[in-house]
């Protein structure tokens, strides 16, 4: 590898679940954290490609895949942080594998996990739910089947047109019909389904079936129009270049891709390079050939899916890139896959230490800057009158601009004294307070003294308590004279009504008092 730009070309298309098998033997195959980690390990061992995304077919999806993807993302973050033992235990690999991946991540290599969504009839009906649970960095949209009228199976039979197993059906279906069915399905999916990259557009020509040149270019123009409208990138697939195909077919394939690259650049459509590798040894294969096509078209930027968006990767740093990087001041990229979800505390990593004096300097800068207010403009007209009074001295650390704006705002508030007076005139006068005369007259009313009922009772008990009642009357008279002035003392004067409680020698009088109520009941 002589040109360092070859390693910088992102590989957006790879399959970690292995090579294709015969059509009837292919079954769903579950991801494992070890499988994905070792897929990235081989790229780190070669230090190429620096940007790598794995995207397996929809018919291989299983419910175990989301869990394995989450586990390997955690392992990649541990490897990026330098925790080799934790990364090895999480991914189920050796510490030597974790060490190689950790070195690659620290050198700037980045890995993504996506999916290639096609119209394979063997895929699960809920395949899209599994893809959503994967939280893919990118989705490659492709077509591998077209509905045809099979001579034995009947109408609408899904034909795997790029497989050698069903090549005999080319005698029934013409090349023009194949491309017409293929493009109709692909264009409809690109317009309606979520897509980041349109995968291997020339896949119907795998077995050498090319339409007429004029018709082919019309299909290319239609593809680029849809991609430009939807914000989709176009893939340049290199699998055809390193597989066993005649040189004439490879030459025509390169001519078609070179034309597509030139058209994509002219229309502002992003380009993605994919090896379509089904084995680690094919990662980034034939990228040196594609680099020549990119140089001929003067293409320097390629796309790489990151967290559901298409990031730009420059093959050669230009002055524009360096100036943009200096102005933006971008933060270092997150380790491993860009989709986050774990904090440093969850990963068992120490918190990032702030540089000494950073907090103090930041607080001082905040105090010196003062409150953010609109800058004063001498030409600006305002309804509020301004007062030409000299600003008062201030001890706060404010800038000249903030001090001037604060002084003007304070002067405008002082120059508005008439506003509260108008509000007071509108309010009705408060009603006069009621006189306090009735309150003084209320306590004059004397309640009937309860002691007068005692002489009306003609009994032996009344004669014995006559002396006691006389004493009670004197106390009541003194209390009543005091109640003429205030009501509250009158309530307290009723307390001496119970002087007999401490003087009761026995419980005899209490029993007699109960008996005196009986004649009262008889009279009624």
Image (cartoon, grey):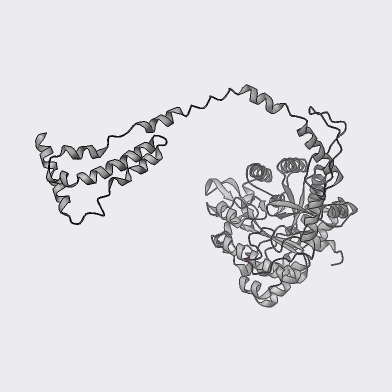
Residue 473 appears in the picture as rendered: yes
Q: Which percent across, then down, holds residue 239?
A: 73, 59
Comparing 113 with 493, the one in front is 493
Is residue 504 shown left or right of residue 415?
left
Q: Which percent across, then down, holds residue 269?
A: 77, 45
Comparing 252 with 53, the one in front is 53
Comparing 338 with 60, the one in front is 338
Residue 330 appears in the picture as rendered: no
Q: Is residue 429 above or below residue 9?
A: above
Region rendered in magenta = 340-353
Is residue 79 shown left or right of residue 472?
right
Q: Quadrant of residue 41?
A: bottom right
Q: Quadrant of the N terminus?
A: bottom right
* Residue farthest left in this picture: 522
Q: Main secondary structure of the magenta part?
A: loop
Q: Residue at x 67, y 55 (%)?
A: 137
Q: Quadrant of residue 313?
A: bottom right
Is residue 352 shown left or right of residue 158?
right
Q: Which percent across, then down, holds residue 280?
A: 70, 67
Q: Residue at x 68, y 69 (%)?
A: 350
Q: In the image, is residue 73 part of the stretch drawn in magenta?
A: no
Q: In the image, is residue 349 part of the stretch drawn in magenta?
A: yes
Q: Residue at x 69, y 70 (%)?
A: 79
Q: Quadrant of the C terminus?
A: top left
* Residue farthest right in this picture: 319
Q: Which percent across, then down, holds residue 176?
A: 68, 43
Q: Is residue 9 above or below residue 183?
A: below
Q: For the image shown, how many numbered marks are present on the structure?
A: 0
């Amino acid at each position: 590898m002589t040109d360092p730009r070859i390693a910088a070309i992102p590989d957006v298309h790879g399959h970690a679940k292995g090579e294709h098998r015969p059509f009837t033997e292919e079954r769903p195959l579950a991801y494992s954290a070890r499988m994905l980690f070792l897929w990235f390990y081989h790229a780190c061992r070669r230090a190429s490609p620096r940007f790598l995304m794995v995207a397996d077919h929809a018919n291989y999806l299983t419910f175990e895949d989301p869990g394995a993807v989450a586990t390997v993302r955690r392992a990649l973050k541990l490897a990026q942080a330098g925790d080799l033992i934790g990364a090895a235990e999480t991914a189920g690999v050796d510490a030597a594998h974790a060490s190689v991946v950790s070195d690659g991540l620290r050198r700037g290599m980045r890995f993504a996990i996506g999916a290639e969504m096609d119209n394979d009839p063997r895929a699960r009906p809920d395949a899209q739910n599994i893809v959503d649970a994967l939280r893919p960095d990118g989705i490659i949209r492709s077509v591998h089947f077209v509905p045809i009228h099979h001579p034995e199976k009947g109408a609408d039979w899904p034909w795997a047109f790029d497989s050698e197993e069903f090549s005999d059906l080319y005698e029934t279906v013409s090349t023009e019909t194949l491309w017409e069915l293929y493009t109709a399905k692909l264009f409809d999916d690109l317009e309606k389904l979520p897509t980041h990259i349109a995968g291997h557009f020339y896949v119907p020509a795998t077995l050498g079936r090319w339409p007429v040149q004029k018709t082919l270019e019309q299909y290319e123009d239609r593809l680029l129009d849809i991609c430009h409208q939807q914000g989709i990138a176009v893939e340049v697939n290199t699998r055809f270049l390193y597989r066993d195909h005649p040189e004439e077919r490879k030459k025509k394939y390169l001519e078609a891709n070179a034309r597509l690259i030139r058209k994509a650049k002219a229309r502002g459509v992003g380009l993605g390079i994919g090896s379509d590798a089904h084995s680690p040894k094919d990662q980034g294969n034939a990228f040196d050939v594609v680099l020549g096509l990119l140089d001929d078209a003067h293409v320097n930027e390629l796309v790489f899916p990151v967290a559901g968006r298409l990031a730009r990767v420059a093959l050669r740093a230009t002055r524009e890139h360096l100036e943009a990087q200096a102005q933006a001041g971008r933060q270092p990229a997150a380790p491993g896959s860009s989709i986050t979800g774990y904090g440093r505390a969850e990963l068992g990593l120490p918190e990032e230490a702030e540089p000494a004096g950073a907090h103090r300097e930041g607080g001082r800068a905040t105090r010196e800057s003062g409150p953010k207010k609109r800058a004063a403009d001498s030409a600006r007209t305002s309804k509020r009158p301004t007062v030409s009074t000299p600003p008062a001295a201030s001890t706060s650390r404010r800038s000249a601009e903030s001090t001037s704006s604060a002084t003007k705002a304070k002067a405008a508030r002082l120059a508005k004294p008439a506003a509260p007076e108008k509000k007071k005139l509108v309010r009705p006068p408060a009603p006069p307070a009621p006189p306090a005369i009735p309150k003084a007259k209320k306590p004059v009313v004397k309640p009937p003294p309860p002691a007068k009922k005692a002489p009306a009772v003609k009994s032996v008990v009344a004669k014995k308590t006559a002396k006691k009642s006389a004493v009670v009357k004197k106390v009541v008279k003194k209390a009543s004279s005091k109640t003429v002035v205030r009501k509250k003392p009158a309530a307290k004067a009723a307390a001496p009504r119970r002087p007999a409680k401490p003087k009761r020698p026995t419980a005899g009088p209490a029993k007699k008092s109960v008996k005196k109520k009986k004649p009262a009941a008889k009279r009624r």
